[in-house]
């Protein structure tokens, strides 16, 4: 059990040296933590890009002050998020060299190209045209300005494409053969089409891009709901809220249906991950646990059928994995020498799926109110959207954990183990030290981003003319008007 | 039909060398462009509140795009020479991590500064901005020096390269700001830039002397080769031309010479690294390069895009050409 093994090794080191983690465990925690923070901002760029394009286009075309408001507010968020995405993104590719140099060396021919294309085709595009978008309103024509917003968005989506080419290859590697070079067995590229368009690639791209749109849409909806709650007549924020509900009506059901088919694909291509998602230990018929409640604290760290209260559909796991046979044999985790940390995968998967259903519910509820033309009347709906605004991100992160932690002990499925990819020269002191530094630095970064968001929201409230004091029982101030 | 993507031979025999050139070019672009950002960040410490706004107005639209050249350099190195990427970064673990953290602080601080009017908040962000802008090029120079000379982090050649890069960045930043402003601010930039150029030249001479004396990784012979002497001569010429242009208030020309200085420095590094791409282990370009199919593919898909990227930069710098004024930021 690699992860458990690493945990045990780490704990032993911890006991011996009091504070230090093993280089492997520290490297994995460091990569996991830095990607957790980075992905928030990467998804922000991807999910917000279509909104930015739309607001910019409407603003330039119609001179409608509501769209000018929305453009200005969200471009500010986008700009700060993009800076944070850049500065947290650079450590990601660096860590392939600093912490996992064996991974860089073994799969360099397969991952190097796509990462270089990401920088050249996507990252430059996004950075250059965002510069124009943020600072060039008075310097370029309307047409160039709108085009800059589109190119910024294309950059974000293309960036996601190349990154997921790399990640999908790590899940379902194709298009290579193992050869020896400089005394190391490395993956040599033999078929670029197979290597770039691996079986996982289309699944992952649709799922991740849609997840980013959902996550950002819930943030947009939550913030819009707050502004509408404070100022029911705000034209701009009622528009934003309606838009978000419409987008959610399309994306949330799509994600649920797509996710179901994606699960079947995972069962085909990564049976061990599928077994971990269902905590399925004994080979045989697999049930699908719709709801699982731990009976004891042990169930949280080591979920098993016998320590969970479950609402299960007997044989549905087999049905999904086999594509139609309720009694099909599903390989259990006991068949493998090493397994991923099952608890993390099992509970992350449950949280993600549960939230996915919640989003469908929120979309239908909002759609129904929208149809009746009473979206902003319901204080209950507005509050629900406010409370749900971070949940899209929770679903996105837990989904990412299922994918990446579920792949363990492999960094490249069945080709290279994570433990073999870690730097041999890295010491426990160095690895633990940088882990602590990254945790502190990124917590500060998150706090700063939260503060910026808060200030932007306060600024908007002030601009609308409603008091920033949270007291909605008070009648609205007389100068508050509906037009923005 | 000729094969579009040959599997077992490079499109041209010298393709590995060409990609060595692309790696070097990306690094030189990074040093020249983000170098001026670092320079602005350091010179920022010497300016008053109004002039700081002017510096930020010059810095704002371009720095993020400039920084991407580091990513282009790193990923190109990984795509063409994976073992070098792996050894360079894992061999300088703390240095590499400190560089990305320095970049983080440098990038985030000015963005956060602009979100509040509060003077205390701004002073704190300003300090972080100056700190990140100073430490990052220093550490990057140390990393490049350690790479090229195969020397430890705390050694004279590595440290001198770091100090040299800091002086070079101040020169680039001063010339860029001078080209975009006038009056007392431009005059101050000429003063700082002149001093930085002199410090840079002294640093380069000291570095060459130390390397010639200690001969780390047997680079002395390479240092006496014609291309290396050419790079040194180019450094002296561009520095001289820059000093003259600065004195004559030909600020745009001065800024042009700082590009020459950056390319000459990275050119010198390239001479030391060819063909022995990783002096510490002796791994060469031909031993480290990826297989023909992979490199051919990167060539066909990557090189045309690189030309497009250069056009983007022409467009970006063209859009924001001309004098800056802090009040428009």
Image (cartoon, helix red, strand yellow):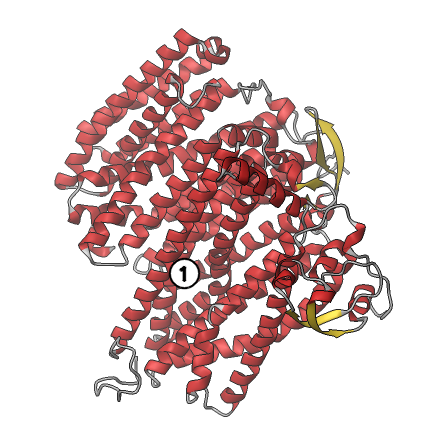
x and y, in percent, of residue A304 in the image? 71, 62
Among the 4 quarters of the image, the one containing residue B104: top left
Residue A86 appears at what percent x and percent y?
A: 44, 49
Label 1 neighbourhood size at 10 Å, few (<14), some (14-19), many (20+)? many
Taking the image as shown, residue B228 lies to the left or right of residue A170, namely left
Residue furthest bottom in the image? A372
Asked if residue B323 shows in the view, the reply is no
In the image, A390 versus A61, the foreground residue is A390
**Rendered residue at 47%/21% (across/down):** B148
Which residue is rendered at x = 27% and y = 32% of the image?
B170
> For this view, does A36 lie left or right of residue A192?
left
Q: Quadrant of the C terminus of chain B?
A: bottom left
Q: Is residue B68 above or below residue B156?
A: below
Residue at the spot 43% in from the left edge and 15% down from the top edge: B228
Nearest the camera: B9 or A270? Answer: A270
- Give the percent coordinates (x, y) of residue B116: 24, 59
Look at mark 1 in the image and give the residue it sits on: A78
Q: Is residue B302 above or below residue B150?
A: below
Location of residue B81 with respect to A402 vertically, above or below = above
Q: Residue at (56%, 37%) from the top-left corner?
A: A13
Q: Using residue B124 as the reference point, say whether residue A100 is left or right of it.
A: right
Please, which residue is most extreme toward the left here?
A: B184
């Amino acid at each position: 059990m690699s992860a458990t093994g690493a945990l045990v090794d780490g704990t032993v080191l911890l006991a011996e040296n009091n504070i230090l983690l093993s280089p492997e465990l520290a490297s994995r925690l460091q990569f996991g933590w830095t990607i957790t923070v980075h992905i928030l901002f990467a998804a922000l760029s991807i999910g917000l890009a279509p909104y930015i394009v739309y607001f910019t286009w409407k603003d330039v075309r119609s001179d409608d002050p509501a769209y000018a408001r929305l453009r200005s507010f969200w471009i500010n968020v986008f700009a700060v998020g993009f800076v944070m995405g850049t500065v947290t993104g650079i450590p990601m590719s660096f860590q392939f060299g600093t912490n996992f140099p064996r991974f860089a060396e073994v799969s360099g021919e397969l991952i190097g190209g796509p990462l270089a294309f990401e920088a050249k085709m996507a990252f430059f595009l996004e950075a250059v045209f965002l510069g124009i978008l943020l600072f060039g309103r008075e310097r370029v024509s309307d047409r160039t300005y709108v085009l800059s917003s589109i190119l910024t968005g294309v950059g974000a989506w293309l960036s996601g494409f190349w990154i997921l080419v790399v990640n999908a290859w790590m899940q379902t590697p194709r298009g290579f053969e193992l050869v020896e070079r400089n005394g190391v067995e490395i993956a040599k590229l033999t078929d670029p089409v197979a290597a770039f368009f691996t079986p996982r690639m289309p699944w992952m791209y649709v799922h991740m891009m849609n997840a980013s749109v959902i996550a950002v849409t819930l943030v947009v909806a939550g913030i819009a709901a707050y502004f509408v709650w404070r100022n029911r007549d705000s034209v701009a924020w009622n528009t934003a809220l309606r838009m978000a509900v419409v987008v959610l009506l399309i994306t949330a059901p799509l994600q649920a249906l797509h996710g179901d088919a994606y699960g079947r694909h995972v069962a085909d291509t990564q049976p061990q991950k599928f077994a971990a998602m269902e905590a399925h230990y004994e080979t045989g018929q697999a049930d699908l646990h719709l709801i699982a409640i731990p009976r004891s604290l042990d169930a949280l760290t080591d979920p098993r059928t016998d320590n969970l209260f479950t609402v299960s559909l007997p044989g549905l796991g087999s049905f999904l994995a086999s594509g139609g046979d309720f009694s099909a044999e599903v390989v259990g985790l006991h068949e493998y020498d090493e397994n991923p940390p099952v608890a993390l995968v099992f509970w992350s998967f449950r949280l993600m799926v549960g939230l996915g259903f919640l989003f469908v519910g929120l979309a239908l509820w909002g759609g129904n109110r929208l149809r009746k033309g009473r979206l902003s009347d319901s204080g209950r709906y507005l509050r629900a959207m406010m409370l749900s605004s971070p949940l899209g991100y929770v679903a996105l992160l837990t989904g990412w954990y299922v994918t990446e932690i579920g792949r363990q002990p492999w960094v490249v499925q069945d080709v290279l183990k994570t433990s073999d990819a870690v730097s041999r020269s890295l010491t426990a002191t160095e690895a633990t030290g940088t882990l602590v530094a990254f945790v502190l630095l990124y917590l500060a970064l998150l706090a700063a981003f939260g503060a910026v968001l808060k200030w932007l929201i306060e600024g908007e409230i002030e601009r609308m003319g409603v008091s920033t004091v949270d007291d909605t029982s008070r009648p609205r101030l007389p100068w508050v008007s509906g037009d923005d | 039909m000729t094969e579009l993507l040959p599997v077992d031979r490079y499109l041209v025999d010298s393709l590995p060398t060409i990609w060595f050139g692309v790696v070097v070019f990306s690094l030189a672009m990074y040093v020249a462009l983000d170098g001026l950002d670092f320079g602005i960040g350091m010179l920022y410490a010497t300016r008053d509140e109004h002039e700081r706004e002017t510096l930020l107005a010059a810095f704002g639209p371009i720095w993020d795009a400039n920084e991407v050249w580091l990513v282009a350099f790193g990923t190109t190195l990984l795509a063409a020479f994976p073992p070098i990427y792996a050894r360079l970064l894992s061999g300088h673990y703390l240095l590499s991590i400190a560089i990305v953290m320095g970049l983080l602080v440098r990038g985030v601080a000015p963005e956060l500064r602009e979100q509040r009017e509060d003077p205390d908040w701004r002073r704190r962000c300003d300090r972080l901005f100056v700190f990140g802008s100073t430490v990052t090029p220093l550490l990057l120079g140390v990393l490049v020096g350690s790479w090229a000379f195969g020397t430890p982090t705390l050694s004279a050649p590595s440290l001198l390269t770091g100090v040299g890069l800091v002086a070079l960045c101040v020169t680039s930043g001063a010339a860029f700001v001078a080209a975009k402003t006038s009056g007392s601010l431009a005059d101050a930039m000429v003063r700082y830039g002149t001093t930085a150029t002199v410090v840079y030249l002294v640093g380069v001479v000291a570095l060459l002397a130390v390397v010639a004396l200690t001969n780390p990784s047997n680079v002395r012979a390479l240092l006496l080769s014609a291309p290396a002497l050419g790079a040194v001569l180019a450094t002296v010429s561009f520095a001289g031309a820059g000093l003259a242009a600065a004195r004559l208030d030909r600020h745009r020309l001065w800024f042009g010479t700082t590009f020459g200085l950056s390319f000459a420095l990275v050119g010198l590094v390239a001479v030391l690294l060819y063909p022995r791409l990783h002096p510490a282990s002796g791994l060469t370009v031909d031993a480290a390069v990826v297989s023909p199919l992979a490199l051919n593919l990167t060539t066909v898909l990557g090189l045309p895009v690189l030309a497009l990227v250069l056009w983007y930069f022409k467009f970006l710098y063209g859009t924001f050409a001309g004098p800056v004024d802090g009040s428009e930021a």
